[in-house]
Amino acid sequence: MDVQERIRNTVTENSVVLFMKGTPQQPMCGFSMTAVQILNACGIKEFHSVNVLEDQDVRQGIKTFANWPTIPQLYVKGEFVGGSDIMREMYQSGELQSEIQRLLKAG
């Protein structure tokens, strides 16, 4: 299975997936820490995380998968939501909470 298939399987088999640097318990960059804090603030306490620092193929492959150059990347029900800046903007406007709930209910 190639890296794109592995990524596709990960985002479709898990309701909420965060590709990040480090783990939710120990983020390895400020952007990943922000993304975890935003998810927690949205009431998402448990989600699947992928530490891109552990797999160079995934670290590069996720950028191609979403055509998005930065990490972290959030997926809800297989849909790419965005990186930490987009998550922060959406959270501040209330849009992220609504979008997460909409996508989780749709599935």
Image (tube, grey):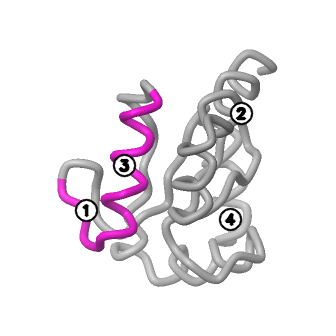
Give SS at disc 2. helix
Residue at left 49%, top 60%?
19
Q: Are marks 1 and 3 in contact (CB under 8 Å)?
A: yes
Q: Does the stretch in magenta take in 28? A: yes
**The residue tagged with tag 3: helix, strand or loop?**
helix
* Dot 4 or dot 1, earlier in sequence: 4
Quadrant location, the C terminus: top right
Q: Which type of secondary structure does the marked residue at label 4 adopt?
A: loop
Identify residue type, mark 4.
Met
Q: Which percent across, then down, holds residue 101?
A: 66, 22
Q: Residue 49 or 88: which is nearer the viewer?
A: 88
Report if the CB atoms under discs 3 and 2 are less than 8 Å apart.
no
Mark 4 vs mark 2: in front: 2
Q: Position of residue 84 (x, y in %)?
A: 51, 62
Task: Identify residue type, mark 3.
Answer: Val
Sequence order check: which comes first, mark 3 or mark 2? Answer: 3
Question: Mark 4 — residue?
Answer: 1
Q: Horizontal placement of 102 versus 76: left or right?
A: right
Residue on which disc 3 sits: 36
Magenta extent = 26-42
Residue under pointer 2: 99
Residue 27, which numbered label?
1
Q: Look at the image and tell me in which quarter the N terminus lies.
A: bottom right
Q: Amino acid at mark 1?
A: Pro
